[in-house]
Image (cartoon, grey):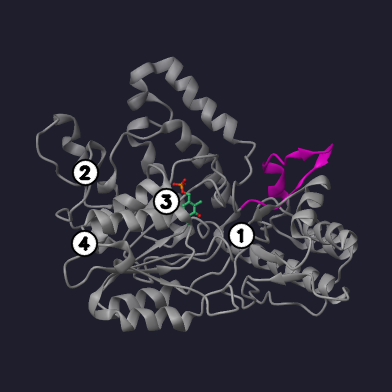
Amino acid sequence: MDTHVGLSPQYKNTPEYARYLDEQDPLQSFREKFYIPIMHGREAIYFTGNSLGLQPRSTQDYVLNELEDWANYGVEGHLHARNPWLSYHELFPSLLKDIVGAKEHEVVVMNQLTVNLHLLLTSFYRPNKQRFKIICEAKAFPSDQYALDSQAALHGFDPAEAIIEVGPSPGRQDIDHEDIINAIQSHANELSLVMFSGVNYYTGQVFDMASICKAAHEAGALCGFDLAHAAGNVELQLHDWDVDFACWCSYKYLNSGPGGVAGAYIHERHAANTQLPRMAGWWGHDKEERFKMDRHFKAIPTAEGWQLSNAPILSMAAHKASLDIFAEAGMDRILHKGKQLNAYLQYILDDINAHQSEKVIDIITPRAEGMRGCQVSMLMLKDGKEIFQELGKKSVIADWREPNVIRVAPVPLYNRFEDVYRFGEILADML
Ligand SMILES: *Cc1c(COP(=O)(O)O)cnc(C)c1O
């Protein structure tokens, strides 16, 4: 496959050229598998797949099937539903393994993201007096900050002392990779855990997960990632990178519906260790013996051993509908198109800036390939709020982050190159 998708000299800021790119796109027909919101009487330019992915047209059928089976079978659906509920969660590892780069027994679908983060921190943040520090990114998503602070406090540590945040250097928005590695090395003696996002939600920066993980291990610490903005967006090789644990949600790039069921990854060397401390529940108990209702917990020796409750089937049905589309499209093609869309967007924004007397849009997402996924964060240097509101009136659904950032994320499964062109046209007209 041609993987060169850097800025192409042939790019043109014209509708004909955008349509030409769409015609070349092997995933072009996948757009028809989704409901595109209608705004002001026409299809929206939906650029918030990083926040809530669109609904596949097949989702209703998948959910309806389970409602029908519940109506027809009642409790017997656990065994006799078309996809028996007892083992429904077992449908997911084969669908997720290519998305996160893991072995099947390292992946489990359960709960929601922040819940999973806490469950994993319970097992993998095991501080002692000597090693108690956590290194993470500054301005992480608030839920992650709260989770880390509260975990440190639960173990009797002052978060202000235990949590080391690595931030951008002055005047920058993205975080220098060297600064992350230096922080890990300089705190090596006291370090318990390195916990980063895969993709920062605000800047769209993709972190070098492989080398962060390597540095963490060299410092004698464990390493985990929150992949909320990474799963389904950028290449992940969790197993090969030797990542200890990770979690993600399913409603952003994975299109599985608001508040949908989430996922977790636990490296096999930990997953197989049934003695690892954890919050235990009956769904994580040895399957052969689960219904003996025995007094003592016996963990399943895979990622499933972290499950607590029986599976939320309706939410899982929506997740399955979407992951079946991912399987049909293939992660290689999805990642490739994501990069192409992003490169074209970058070109269009540069072209707009070049035609202004002064720079109005500062792209704070790193430019280097490999450091960006679908999302581009635009720091608006003037009239940001007004421009954002005007975009809404022109049927563009983007996302505003205080103080001055518009985030846009054209995604491979349902956005077109023409959407990128039209977005640029609308933006240029306004300026
Ligand atoms: C979206 C997001 C969350 C949201 O957490 P939920 O538990 O799903 O509500 C948490 N962390 C990060 C990094 C996110 O991007």
Q: Are marks 4 and 3 in contact (CB under 8 Å)?
A: no
Horizontal arrangement in the rendering, residue 221 relative to residue 241 (left or right):
left
Residue hosting label 2: 280
Residue hosting label 4: 126
Span colored in magenta = 29-49
Residue hosting label 1: 334
Q: Confirm whether the magenta stretch covers residue 37.
A: yes
Instruction: Report the mark closest to the observer, 1 or 2.
Output: 2
Distance, label 1 to label 4, CA atoms, is: 37 Å
Instruction: Report the mark closest to the observer, 2 or 3.
Output: 2
First of labels 3, 1 by sequence position? 3
Q: Amino acid at mark 3?
A: Ser
Q: Amino acid at mark 1?
A: Ile
Camera-side residue of 334 and 54: 54
First of labels 2, 4 by sequence position? 4
Residue 247 visible in rendering? no
Instruction: Report the mark closest to the observer, 2 or 4.
Output: 4
First of labels 2, 3 by sequence position? 3
Quadrant of the drawing holding the N terminus? bottom right
Residue in the picture at 30% in, 50% down: 119
Instruction: Report the mark closest to the observer, 4 or 3.
Output: 4
